[in-house]
Amino acid sequence: MLLLAPCAAASAQDRGIPAEDIKSGKAFVSRETQEQQDDLTDNPGMLWVERGGELWKEPAGPEGKSCASCHGAPESMKGVAPRYPLVDEKLGRLVNLETRIQACVAQHQQALVPPYESQELLALTSLVAHQSRGLPMSVKIDGSAAPFFAQGDKLFHEKQGHLDLSCAQCHVENWGKRLRTETLSQGYANGFPAYRLEWQTLGSSHRRLRACFQGVRAEPFAAGSPEFIALELYLAWRGQGLAIETPAVRR
């Protein structure tokens, strides 16, 4: 579903795909998978959302603080996920939802930081993002975010690996076509963390990006790296107006 949302610096046409043709990754999976995503009693990603709800209340660190100690109920996070990635002026860098949670754990709980792609971080990220399910993605790409956006733009369009392919060649120029057993999507990240049937588990958008890089035989950046967060910002802008679907179910 495409919702109306403000776009800071560019039109849908600049994304390489006309506004009327923009489709979430949900449009490129089977009807059965779409129904599994929509039915929260059948959506396997909800197991991580539920686990995130438990972790939200668990005390950690020397003072025994929990996420709830500062933020109250998880519902207070409604509207947060659509704004990420964003520049954290105190940290002086671009952060996504995962690295924002890691920073909160380190700074405010003074507890052991859950590693990227760990079950704990996936659960908390899913919980927070799920509160905004149905809301439109709406990231800022101007001001202090501009250089990071430019970096992500460059990564999206630059050819990578032994196959000499760019993200744009698959997800802008050839979306809807078949690549082996898959239909190429338009490459948005509005459903992550997502449950992928091929993984049989939940994973972050950075896990998916690493798989794409490996698919073109390029050396992938580390999950949580500044490069992938910049690319994530660009992908979030490309999906501006698409509804958050976390946890999405994908092939």
Image (spheres, rainbow, N blue to C red):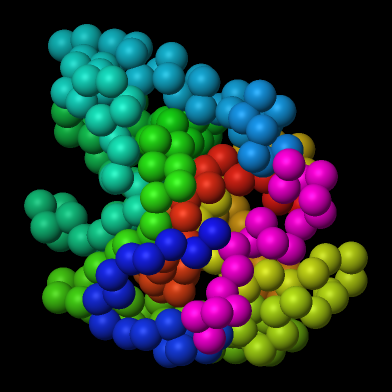
In this view, the residue in front, 144 or 29, is 29
Name the residue rendered at 53%, 86% in the picture: 18
Quadrant of image for the N terminus: bottom right
Residue 109 in view of the camera = no
Q: In this view, does 223 lie above or below 8?
A: above
Magenta residue check for 23: yes
* Residue 231 drawn at (x, y percent): 44, 70
Asked if residue 44 lies left or right of residue 191, the reply is right
Name the residue rendered at 51%, 27% in the picture: 49
Residue 184 falls in which quadrant of the image? bottom right
Residue 18 in view of the camera = yes
Q: Is residue 7 above or below residue 101?
A: below
Name the residue rendered at 59%, 63% in the picture: 24
Which residue of the protein is positioned furthest toward the left in this rendering? 90
The overriding secondary structure of the stretch rendered in magenta is helix
Asked if residue 192 lies left or right of residue 81, the reply is right
Report the span colored magenta. 18-35
